[in-house]
Image (cartoon, rainbow, N blue to C red):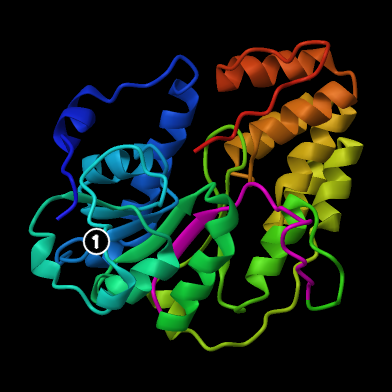
Amino acid sequence: MAKEYDLFQHLQTRVHGPDDLEKSERHVVFAQWIADELLPSTAATRRGRVLDVAGGKGHLSTALLEAGLHCALIDPHAVTGRAFHNVPPHEAGDRDLDGIGDEPVVVLRQTIQQVLSTWPSLVDSCLAVVGLHPDEATEPIVDLALARNLPFAVLPCCVYPKQFQRKSLCGAGVRKHGAFIEYLMEKDPRIRVASLPFVGRNTCVFMSASDYQRPRERARKPDYNPCALAAKAGDLPLLQELRQKGHPWNEEVCRAAAWTGHLHVLEWALLSRCPWSWTVVIDAATRGKHEGVVQWACDFARIPAPSTTGREASDDR
C-alpha cells in the first residue's frame, strides 16, 4: 500500500495561501451546487463517491465532504491525502474496493484513464464525475461520463488550442472559451449549462441522471440576440416584454448593458436571475469606460476595482 498522509489534519486546518480565499469560495459554491442540483435525487440513498478529477490541492474534495458527499480525488499531481496509486502495469485490472474502506475522501495519484484500468468499479459505482477548471482533463471527463451514462459537471477554463486541434460540428476551430463550451455541448443535445455565482470562469457544463432519460433530440439553437440588443439600447421595458414572452437570455445581456453603461438594466437583470458573470460585467464596463458601473459591480461582488494597467487573471484550481 502507498504511503499514507494525514488527510484529516489537512481537512481540519484547511490551510490556504493569501490568494486562496476567492478560489475556496468557488469550490464551496460548486460543491453545494453538486449536492443540491446535480445529485438531489440521490440524497437519501448515496453510497458511491463523487470523482473529483484534476482536483489539485483538494479544495473541491474538502468542500464536497462538507456538503455531505464522499469523494475520490483523481490527480497524478495531488499534494495531499491518502494515495492508492502505486499499481505496477502488470497488476492492472479491477482493484478491490475494500482496500479503500469507508474513508470519506481518498486520493488516487493517477489520471482518469489510469483509474479506469486499475479501479473500474470505482468509476462504475460513482455518483458523478466533476472538475472545477480541470484544464486538459475537461474533455476526458465529459467523454467518460457520456460513455458510461454518469452524471457529470465541469467548469471549463483553459482551452489549449495549440495542444488540442478541436473542430466544432460546423468545422470551425475551437480557440476561445465560449467556443469550447459549445463544442462540449455538441457531444450530446441533452447537455445543459448553468452559471454559478462566483467571479471568474463560472459556466458549468453538466448532465444529471434524469437528463439521460430525455430523448436525444437536438434542440433548435436559442436566439439570444433580441434580449442582448434591448440591453445594449438600455430599453428595459422592451427587455422585460421579451422575457415575459419567453425569449431566452444569456451573459450577453449583462455584457451589452455594462458596455453601454445602462446600470438600471443591469440591476433589473441581476434581480431577475439573468445568467451572470461579474468578470464579464466589470470587463465590459471597463472597456466602455463606465466607471460608475465598474464601481457598482466591484462593490456588489466585493472585489477590488481593476487597476488602470489591466487585470491579472487567476483561475488556478
Lateral position of residue 314 relative to residue 100, left or right: right
Q: Position of residue 90 (x, y in %)?
A: 29, 77
Q: Is residue 159 magenta?
A: yes
Total numbered labels: 1
Lateral position of residue 178 relative to residue 172, left or right: left
Lateral position of residue 128 relative to residue 94, left or right: right
**Residue appearing at x 85%, y 18% in the figure:** 290
Q: Position of residue 287 (x, y in %)?
A: 88, 25
**Residue appearing at x 76%, y 33% in the figure:** 265
Lateral position of residue 38 relative to residue 306, left or right: left
Which quadrant of the structure image shows residue 299?
top right
**Residue appearing at x 53%, y 89% in the figure:** 215
Which residue carries the number 1 mark?
49
Q: Residues within 10 Å of mark 1 (few under 14, many from 20)?
A: many
Mark 1 is on which residue type?
A: Arg
Look at the image and tell me in which quarter the N terminus lies. bottom left
In front of the other: 33 or 162: 162
Q: Is residue 164 magenta?
A: yes
**Residue appearing at x 49%, y 38% in the figure:** 317
Q: Position of residue 211 (x, y in %)?
A: 45, 76
The answer to whether residue 309 of the structure is visible from this angle is yes
**What span is in magenta?**
149-168
**Relative to 271, is 221 above or below?**
below
**Relative to 28, is 264 above or below?**
above
